[in-house]
Amino acid sequence: MEARKKGDNIEGYKILAELGQGAASIIYLVQDPRTKQIWALKHVRKNNAKEQRFLDQAEAEYRVAQTLDHPGVRKIPKLIKVGKFLSVRELVLLMELVDGVSLDKHPPETFEDAVFVFEQVARAMHHMHERGWVHADMKPNNIVVDDANIAKIIDLGQSCKTGTIKERIQGTPDYIAPEQVHRREITPATDVYNLGATMYWVLTRQHIPTALAKSDSLVGSLDDNLMERPKPASELNRKIHPMLNELIMQCVEVDPAKRPASMNDIAEKLNLIHGILKAGASGMYGSISD
């Protein structure tokens, strides 16, 4: 997909810069010439029938966003289809501009900041769960944090209704839950696992073993009872508070029934841990790294 140049227009929006690229999409920084409002704009194009799923995913992301109203989830106010009804080859998503950096590129430097980010993400996903949706792809690069340590979820592309059984395996190998690999029901407990795997990486810089074999594709999955259990996060980073370690390891239990009951429970536990860390931030639980 060839990128448009600065100054070009897409469906009436002026391109100011390119922000990034995906498999079949390019995200631009754009301005509405009428209102001068700045937006992020995702331009998705299919080049063949096999790429129809990219259009479907973008449209699904828009539909999910319309049902949500939480400051921790990126808003998508507009969807534009390019082409005739039966031959749409392009979609444009007008999205809230999120000014920040994703966790994978700039993880928090202190436990206090990290736990505050985790709590915000948990509350945002609790809102999704209340509205009947599961995010289904929580990972560090889907969390953007600004200079004030305010976090926002930016990608709803794999979100689905609670109880969905997907036709194919979807998820990111280092964060995917066992039920996603084995194509069982996707539930809020799936997001709990994904968030637990995200917290594990942020605090240890190591990934948990997943139900996927070490390969470049989502194949070769292991049965649940054969999965390697992750080392306690606190064994990899001894500065992790015991309560935080316990919560992370509960989140990444193979059996969904053994994970925390809800994202609200996780958020409340993180809030408690955040208070403890804040009270003693200058002690052993301050900086994440040595």
Image (cartoon, helix red, strand yellow):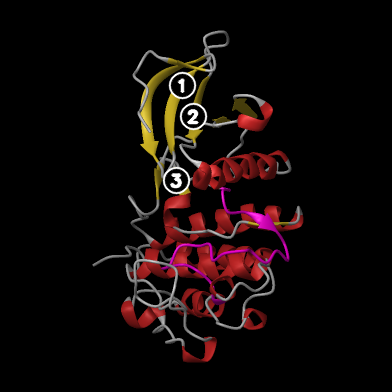
User: Type of residue at label 1?
Assistant: Val
Q: Residues within 10 Å of mark 3 (few under 14, many from 20)?
A: many
State the extent of the magenta-drawn residues as a range: 156-178
Classified by dominant secondary structure, the portion drawn in magenta counts as loop
Q: Can you tell which mark lies on residue 30?
A: 1
Q: Where does the N terminus fall, quadrant-wise? A: top left
Question: Residue at label 2?
Answer: 40
Between the residue at mark 3 and the residue at mark 2, the CA separation in whole angstroms equals 16 Å
Residue 195 at x, y percent in the picture: 52, 65
Among numbered discs 1 and 3, the one appearing first in the sequence: 1
Q: Tell me what residue is drawn at x 63 percent, y 79 percent.
A: 256
Q: Quadrant of residue 140?
A: bottom left
The mark closer to the camera, 1 or 3, is 1
User: Type of residue at label 3?
Assistant: Val
Q: Tell me what residue is drawn at x 38 percent, y 39 percent.
A: 21
Q: Is residue 226 above or below residue 272?
A: below
Among numbered discs 2 and 1, the one appearing first in the sequence: 1
Q: Can you tell which mark lies on residue 145?
A: 3
The front one of 247 and 73 is 73
